[in-house]
Image (cartoon, rainbow, N blue to C red):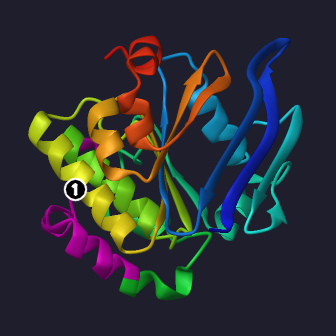
Amino acid sequence: MNALLKVRGLRAGYGAVEVLRGIDLSVAEGEAVALLGSNGAGKSTLNNVMCGIYRAWSGSIAFDSADLTHAHYRDVVKAGLIQVPEGRRVFPNLTVLENLELGAFTRARERRAVNLERSFKLFPRLRERSGQIAGTLSGGEQQMLAIGRGLMAEPRLLILDEPSLGLSPLLVEELFALIRSLRDGGLAVLLVEQNVGQSLEVVDRAYVMENGAIRFSGLPAELLGSDELRRAYLGL
């Protein structure tokens, strides 16, 4: 499969502190890939560098053959690389509907009505809550809203950063069923998670990140089949 996203030799950090130490990673069209690792491994830093929020020190980021290494985050969104950040980060003082509509501000604005209906079909609760102030939603509803807002931009690749964090077990089950459904519908997904077991059930490939470097890359079955890898990197 042709790589939609291709990251090579990526290094980045804060001040003089290096966080990313030569990351190689790729996601193909229609592929779901998990990026696993503990807190502090550098996963969110990698997301934010790929999305143009932080600057890369060196290396390259190619998306659909375009060089996005030093692109402005607005141009990253225009290209179709969309992140649903950790912690949901909905606009708390705006309504559900206003949050969703803002998802189409930079990309797919002319198809906003169609994509809004799609989001409401995926998340019927958002339709019921469309006039409600987003900050008053439950944590699970805010996560639905964050994902719906991301889908409003018609992503070619959707990055989900710790989407199951703080959700009840039932909502976690629903979330992973949704991720599987998005992948089955042909959307490329990069799932950044600490929930190892359920992540590996819905993805095609996995990376394990430790101390700013990729320590494993391969199939979920390979990762789960190695006692050494499971103990060293997954705590299983």
**126 is within the stretch colored magenta:** yes
Kindly report the secondary structure that dominates the magenta region of the rendered protein: helix
- State the extent of the magenta-drawn residues as a range: 115-137
Q: Position of residue 17 (x, y in %)?
A: 79, 12
Image quarter (top left, top right, bottom left or bottom right) of the N terminus: bottom right
Choose between 49 and 24: the one closer to the eye: 24
User: Residue 15's spot in the image, x, y percent?
Assistant: 83, 15
Residue in the picture at 18% in, 70% down: 127
Give the camera-side residue of 173 and 145: 173
Is residue 71 visible to us here? Answer: yes
Q: Which residue is mark 1?
A: 177
230 to the left or right of 14: left
- Whole-percent x and y of residue 61? 79, 50
Q: Where the C terminus falls, by quadrant?
A: top left
Q: Is residue 59 above or below residue 111?
A: above
Residue type at mark 1 is Ala
Residue 230 lies in quadrant: top left
Query: Is 58 situated left or right of 29 in this image?
Result: right
Instruction: Name the secondary structure under disc 1.
Output: helix
The stretch drawn in magenta includes residue 107: no
